[in-house]
Image (cartoon, grey):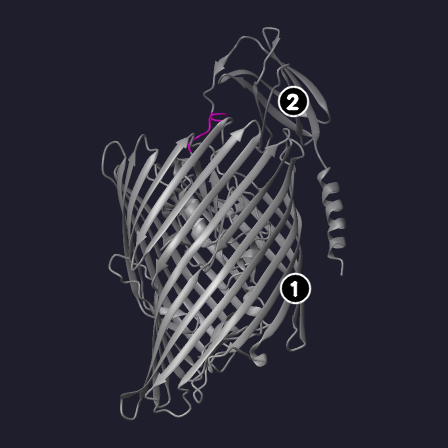
Amino acid sequence: MNYTKHIYPVIICLLCFCQISGQNLKGYVYSDKKPVNSAEVLITDPEQKKYFTVTEENGVFTIELPANKMYDIKIYSDKKLLTAKSIFLDGNKTENFYAENKEIEIKSVDFVVRKKKIIQQKTDRIVFNVENSIMASGGDLMDAMRLAPRISIQNDDIKITGKDKILVMVDNRPVNIPKEDLINYLKSIRSDEVSSIEVITNPPAKYIAEGNSGIVNIITKKSKKDYWNLTLNTTGQAATHFISKNGANYNLNYKGLIVSSSLNYVKGYNAPLNYSKIEYPGVTWIEDSKQTALADNFSGRLSLDYKVNKKLTTGLQYIGSFSSPEVESLIESKIFNHADHDKNSVINTNYKDSKSNKFNSFNYHILYDIDTTGKKIAFDFDYFNNINLTNQLFASHTTAAALSGLQNFDAGKNDGYQKITNYSLNLDVEHPTSWVNINYGARLSFTKTQNDIHFYDLTTGTEVLDQNRTNQFTFKENNQSLYFSLNKELNDKWEIQAGLRMENTETTGYSGTLNNESKIRYTKFFPTAYVLYKLNENNQFSINYGKRIHRPEFSLLNPFKYTFSPYSTSEGNPYLLPEFTNNVELTYSYKDFMITSLYYSDLKNGFDMLNILDSGTKIQNTAPLNYIANQSYGLNQYFYFKIFPWLNTNVNITVFNSQSQSSTPVTLSYLNGWNFETKADINITLNKRKTLFFSTNLWSVSKGVTNLDRSTSGFQTDAALKLFLMDKKLQITCYANDIFKSNRIAYTGLSNNNKTTYKNYDDLRFVRLSVVYSFGNKSVKASSREIKNSEEKDRTTSK
């Protein structure tokens, strides 16, 4: 089926719609009978909407404005008001503006930009104005993000409080690179280069409907011409083992060409610990796993943008990531018989997982400013491929096998190949009118996943291909979407926004080994709505609603069964369906320092990895299944306190109730419970020159529930000492993470009436020393193009 034909009528309609425009106003600006070059023209309509342009060398300006309106026009030069005039525009018009040597210094607030509040509540997002925060200055972007409302950063994991997964964007363009590279990239951006951080808890219709999460959008300051910047960084991290991280970023803005690039390399080991306890009838299994995990990753990014003229900008972006991670595990399973409370059997398993991952992404884009009223059109073509090669080996030895059915020795090998290819076309239009601001667009996405898995039995010491555990699987997914949104300021107090996104999805899964094909097709609508009410300058209220979808990661759709040991397997589900979430949020903000949010979330058809235990064979098989319905509601309270000029703190407090129902008899049928989480960041300036800083992060979580499992309490304490030298071009940071090794949360649930307990520790206690040196001009902003296939990229890896 040729899906390309679906987009042509849409593109034609959108382009035709874009031609609906206003009238042209042409003006001549003179002073002392000479044209005024680069005079600033400020135009205001009756609704106080502002338009801005500048004159050319001959004193001429041309601007397109909505017709049939009265406009107030003021013209400035060198911060002086030259002249002012009111005109009624009922068609194309030409006006002369003469300055009669009555230059007046600008004192009116209509031209002087007032200093923004540190925190602003907008219709669909909360804005943290970094450039107005003293404590956010001088560090890196990660430091600034810690101060932003609703954002929680634990162990370099960025979250919006109450959200499972987020998308990080820079200048409205997603940064789709692996987590380690993302953190290094964000740390390479100076906070002084950032204008604001936008926290979007319920994304509007413009963004893809994937995920129940929100968006963190970093807005950088406008770059100046003929500037460049180079940043070098190196980091050493010591925990059980050592990890080194090195990178460089180069940015350039010269004669319309903007270049942004980065290279990063990470290598080293960490040592996660995993613990599980399963209580079968008459028997208890306790499993301890000690791992040595190698990280070996090289990544690079190159972005080129060229401003062809005042209206047209085009560019491309390449992102590549190449890694060879390796995990070696020593797993000891101890089996206790309830009758004599003695250790009857021990199973020792050696497991090794070696991978080779290659990720390549390409984006080409065109941006066209249709006119000066704000009409814009953007076209994107995106392509990526992700190739994973996997080699998994295990060997299990059983000693003192007093229980029947246990094998004395078993060994095997999984060889896997997976290739994911995606390309997408995206069209976005911004169409402001005299009555309402309109935003609309369309998207096509095509994805193909190829899997080729082989299992070899190594019990005899010779590789024997097991056809029953060998699989070839192909999965295709095509998605077509349209969106439309409206934004309207009713008056000084009220602003509304509404949107609707339609997504049609068609999937086909084919198992060559099983000769089995599964097809799924669905069309869904995703409405969004926002209302903002400004009681006064200090008090604002907002309410929003949105529906979201979360599609399964591609690896979860392969029906092949992986074998990790004689008693541990995992398989996918080609019939796995997406889950849907309805979100409602009410927010109140007071001045710069307090935001209160009440939220409600309703999850339907939720999926998760389900651990199914067999009491007879003692085999644990993990498989994804749609079996969860969840309703949660809660309160998030944010405070920002500037106690002294040298001391401030921001505090996040979250309390919420979670109610989960299960449609499978394997788990609990219902679980209800409350959760309480607190986070505080304390920042201290240690000297008058503001070159030495100390900060600490305190985080704690109470006992609670996570879906259908109960969780224990936990806490974590981090601390950092930061020193700036050489006019703040050199930054040295010493950081200690999870100082008391206390972030050890356990989860307890049921599987076929067998009680299970899991507790993992990811080697979180470490000390990190990093050195960052930046030279050139730091005001050049990092350019990053919006990647329109970010949803598909997020799904290439299981969460």
| 112 within the magenta span | yes
Vertical order, 508 against 442 (above or below): below
**Residue 794: x and y, percent?**
53, 57
Vertical order, 167 against 516 (above or below): above
| 676 within the magenta span | no
Mark number, residue 87: 2
Amino acid type assigned to the residue bearing label 1 in the image: Lys
Residue 266, visible in the rendered structure: yes
Assign the magenta stretch its main secondary structure: loop
**Residue 116: x and y, percent?**
43, 35
Vertical order, 76 against 434 (above or below): above
Q: Residue furthest front?
A: 462
Mark number, residue 476: 1
Magenta stretch in the rendered image = 109-115
**Residue 685: x and y, percent?**
25, 39
**SS label for mark 1:** strand
Determine whether, in the image, residue 766 is placed left or right of residue 325. Answer: left
Amino acid type assigned to the residue bearing label 2 in the image: Ile
Which of label 2 and label 1 is nearer to you? 1
Earlier-in-chain disc, 2 versus 1: 2
Determine whether, in the image, residue 65 is placed left or right of residue 686. Answer: right
Using the rendered view, name the quadrant where residue 31 is placed.
top right
Q: Residues within 10 Å of mark 2 (few under 14, many from 20)?
A: few
Residue 575, visible in the rendered structure: no
- Which residue does the image show at 67% across and 77% down from the upper left? 515
- State yes or no: discs 2 and 1 in contact (Cβ < 8 Å): no
- Which residue does the image show at 38% across and 43% down from the upper left? 144
C-alpha separation, residue under disc 2 versus residue under disc 1: 59 Å
**SS label for mark 2:** strand
